Each structure stands twice: as structure tokens, then as C-alpha cells.
Image: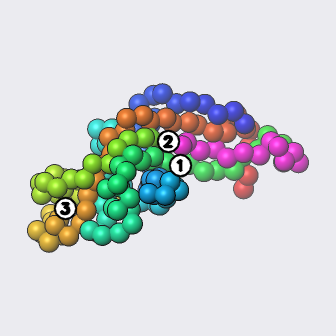
Amino acid sequence: MKTFVVTDPQIIEETIAKTKICFLGMVQPDGTPYVIPMCFGFRDNTFYFHSGNTGSKLDILARNPHVCISLNNGESLIFQHPDVACSYSMVSHSIVAHGEAVFVEDFDEKREALNIIMQHYTGRSFKYGVPAVNNVSIWKVKAEKICCKSFGNRAKRRYE
């Protein structure tokens, strides 16, 4: 199946909005990759993340803030002919973004970042107490490079 590069900003935004989990790729001090699933928010070409105040990912990001973010959604198995293995494929959209993690320290900006994350999942904003904001780490990644691809658009039938 053919892969198509998607450049329409609206389709890219829709793909991100429909995706609930992304994979955050980092580089450990010894050079090995470290990739973890993360909840996220997205606004103005910037991804937002949160976690506890300690942990491996925070240590890694403090040493090397360069990250890769991968998202995928819309998975559906399709085929052109049911008896030809090579005709099977997956219909999906994927995004790969690169950028640099920047820790957010300002209280109001942290609260806004938490709302961006929660709006991604619930469509609404929340109120946060001081401990809720102070006891999490927030970082943002402005997408310096973002690539969206669409897979499997030419097949004729879906596999049920």
C-alpha cells in the first residue's frame, strides 16, 4: 500500500486531536534510546507533558532535552484481495515530531499546561489547587519539525 505525506495543517491537527497516547523518545546518557507512552496536550504547534517530580524521564530530559514524539491513530486492517497476503495493510495516520523539551516553572503557565492536557481528553478546563500544580513537573516541546503520513488509502475492503 502506498504511503502519502500529509501537509494539510487541518488534517495534522485532527490526527493529533484524535490520538490519546503518544510515544516520547529520548536518549539516555549511554546513548541508548528510551521511549515511553505518554498522555499529552497540544496547542499552537506545542506538545505539553506532565509527570511526578522525580524519575528517569526527568533525569534524561535534564541531560539531553532533544526528543522525538510519535503518534498513530485510525488503525484498521484492509485488503485488496482476501487470498493475497501482500494486499493486506493498515489504514492509519501517523505523526513524527522533533523538538526540545523545556521545563515549565511558572505557576500560571503550569496550570495552563495542565488545562491544555485535560482539554485534550475531556474538552474542558479545571481548577487546580496549589499542591496539585506544585507537585508535578511540566514540560513542553515546540514541534520544530513535524511530519504526518497516511497509510493504506487505496485498498478496497476492510477486514472484519
Taking the spot 35% from the left edge, 54% from the top edge, the residue there is 63
Gap between marks 2 and 3, in whole Å? 28 Å
The residue under the point 49% across, 42% down is 96
Q: Position of residue 74 (x, y in %)?
A: 56, 48
**Contact (CB < 8 A) between labels 1 and 3?**
no
* Contact? badges 2 and 1 (CB < 8 Å): yes
Q: Residue at x 16, y 67 (%)?
A: 134
Who comes first in sequence, dot 1 or dot 3? 1
Q: Amino acid at mark 2?
A: Ile
**Whether residue 38 is visible:** yes
Q: Nearer the viewer, mark 2 or mark 3?
A: 2
The residue type indicated by label 3 comes to Phe
State the image quarter where residue 58 is shown.
bottom left
Please report whichever mark, 2 or 3, sits nearer to the chain's N-terminal start. Answer: 2
Q: Is residue 124 above or below residue 89?
A: below
Which span of residues is magenta-colored? 82-95
